[in-house]
Image (cartoon, rainbow, N blue to C red):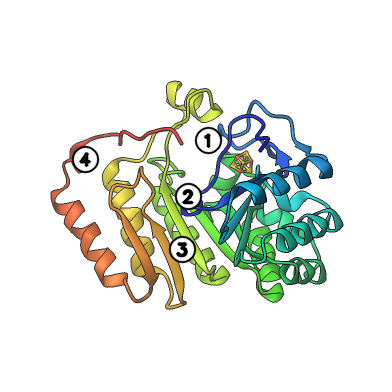
Amino acid sequence: MNYDGKIYRPWPEANSLLIQTTLGCTHNKCTFCDMFREKRFRIKKIEEIYNDIDEARQICRQVESIFLIDGNVLALKTEFLLDILGNITSSFPECSKIALYAGLNDLRRKSVEELKELRQAGLSLVYTGLESGDRMTLKRIKKGLTPEQAEEGMAKAKAAGIDILVSIIFGIGGKERSREHIVKTTKLLNIMKPEQIAPMVLAIQPGTELEKQVEKSEFIQATPLQILEEEKYLLENLADFDTMYWGDHGNNIVSSKGRLPASRELFLGKIDHAIANHPVTKQEVLLTSPW
Ligand code: SF4
């Protein structure tokens, strides 16, 4: 298998076979992100991708789940992606899930018909980064996405029957916009109704623009107590749509994983307990590990 550069995959894909189709990210400008800074976006040659699929088939007896990397794989032309999905499903007939990373703008730029074709070809889950539903926060972090664009991308995926995981970041609004960030994020999630939500705590990645902003005090990090209050607000105010909540990222103060709204009271109980008792609530800044 040929993997170029540093490889990232979402933590729920820990047991998936990774097939690299692109290098880097077409956007590569988000102030908090270090993932693909060293890579120029490029599409791998189809022969290279097929060779990796063949090699993986020889090595792996049973593959239930496949994740396509690197960043925004959905930026690929639909025909190209259909060829890859066709090769995967004929090589791994036992595979029940194919997922990839995509920007909500990548979903928005495809037609519903194209997305339906991709769904029929085996694409079942797309991981997207919303980070925040707050327009000002999205602008400050240079996400290149508006709340309206996020909503449109999500609506197209729903119309095509593709499940969406939306990741959001606790603390991304900083100390000053903590409340606006979580109120507007919750409001947008209630419109989007994603099938899965993955909230994670902001980690300041070395070498990023955000790290420089922290050093110059242009970005003041939310306190651990504010981060817990953001999660409490989210859990209290998410509407009653069925979704999988992946609140178990390694940097999160409280680890909660399960279905909502069924587990709402359980998760809220953990947050309330942490707010009352966890020693981090006395700290100004939460210590996190780079991802
Ligand atoms: S957060 Fe996503 S869209 Fe932004 S630079 Fe990183 S990989 Fe690209």
- Distance between mark 4 and mark 2 Cα atoms: 28 Å
Query: Does the CB distance between marks 1 and 2 fall below 8 Å?
Result: no
- Distance between mark 3 and mark 2 Cα atoms: 27 Å
Decide which of tag 1 and tag 2 comes sooner along the chain.
Answer: 2
Decide which of tag 1 and tag 3 comes sooner along the chain.
Answer: 1
Is 97 in front, or is 24? 97
Residue 160: quadrant of the picture: bottom right
- Distance between mark 1 and mark 3 Cα atoms: 21 Å
Q: Which mark is residue 14?
A: 2
Location of residue 46 in the rendering, given as x and y in whole percent from the top left corner: 83, 45
How many other residues sit within 10 Å of disc 3, few (<14), some (14-19) or many (≥20)? many
Location of residue 152 in the rendering, given as x and y in whole percent from the top left corner: 69, 65
Location of residue 216 in the rendering, given as x and y in whole percent from the top left corner: 46, 21
The residue sitting at 46% across, 63% down in the picture is: 186
Which residue in the structure is indicated by mark 1? 32
How many other residues sit within 10 Å of disc 2, few (<14), some (14-19) or many (≥20)? few
Q: Which mark is residue 186?
A: 3
- From the image, state whether disc 4 or disc 2 is nearer to you: 2
Q: Give the residue type at disc 2.
A: Ala
On the rendering, which quadrant does ligand 1 occupy? top right
